[in-house]
Image: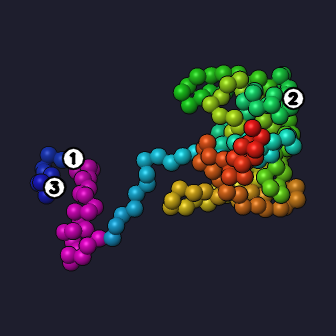
Amino acid sequence: MLAGILNDQNLQPNLRVASDPYLQFAQTHDGAVPKEVYVAKDTYALHSLYPKINHIGQEESIVDSGSQIVSMSEAVAIEIGLTWNPNVTINMQSANGSVEKTLGLAENVPFSFGGVTVYLQVHIIKNPPYRVLLGQPFDMLTSSTVQNTNDGDQRIVISDPNSERRAVLPMYRRGESPDVLQRQKAQSF
C-alpha cells in the first residue's frame, strides 16, 4: 500500500510520505531482529525534597522547574511562623487557567538541605494543591542538576552560592517522605 502512495501522481511534489521505521528496517536489513526499543512511561510521579524551613521543621517541597516562583501554602507559612509582606503580591495563573492573587511575599526564608542553606523569596498562596513548591528561583540559585534513573528515581545536586558547598540529595515521590521523617511523626503521636 505504501508503494502505491509513494507512486501516487496526485500527490503534490513538495509533500513527502514516510514509511514505518520498523517496516523500513525489516525490508532493508538482512533478517536480523532489531534491538528492543525503549519508550517512556505515560506518566511519572512528581518528586519532592524535605528541607528544614525557617529553622522549624521539614516540609514536603515539590521540585517544579516549570514554575517561575517559589511558593507556599498559607497554612504552612503560619505553622512555621513565617511573616510576609502583603504589599508584594502577584497574580498567579494556574495550569487550569484560573487567576488568583498571592497573599504576599516572605523574604529571605532559610531552607536547609543537609549542609546547604539557601535563602528564598517565597510567595504565599491561600489554598494551593501543595504545601511548598520550589520553582525556577530555587533551581537558578542552587545551580541544581537533576539526575534521573530508568526506574523513576531522582537525585538532585545543589550548590550553596554563599559557601560553595555542594550536596547530592535523594528526591522522593510526592506523598512519600523519608523513612526517618516517618519515624519521627510516628513517635510524636
The kind of residue on which mark 1 rests is Gln
Asked whether residue 17 is drawn in magenta, I would say: yes
- Please name the residue that numbered disc 1 is placed on: 12
Residue 78, image quadrant: top right
Residue 74, image quadrant: top right
Q: Is residue 134 left or right of residue 32?
A: right
Q: Residue at 60% of width from left, 44% of height from top?
A: 174
Q: What stretch is highlighted in magenta?
A: 13-34
**What separation in Å lies between label 3 and label 1 (alpha carbons)?**
16 Å
Q: How crowded is mark 1: few (under 14 residues within 10 Å), some or many (20 or more)?
A: few
Mark 3 or mark 1, whichever is nearer to me:
3
Labelled disc at residue 158: none
Query: Of the residues under marks 3 and 1, which one precedes in the sequence?
Result: 3
Residue 25 position, x and y percent, is 25, 68
Labelled disc at residue 83: 2
Visible residue check, residue 89: no
Tell me the element at label 1: loop
Above or below, comparing residue 36 to residue 185 in the picture: below
Q: What is the chief secondary structure element of the magenta stretch?
A: loop
Residue 67 position, x and y percent, is 65, 39
Query: Of the residues under marks 1 and 2, which one precedes in the sequence?
Result: 1
The kind of residue on which mark 3 rests is Leu
User: Quadrant where the C terminus lies?
Assistant: top right
- Please name the residue that numbered disc 3 is placed on: 2
Visible residue check, residue 2: yes
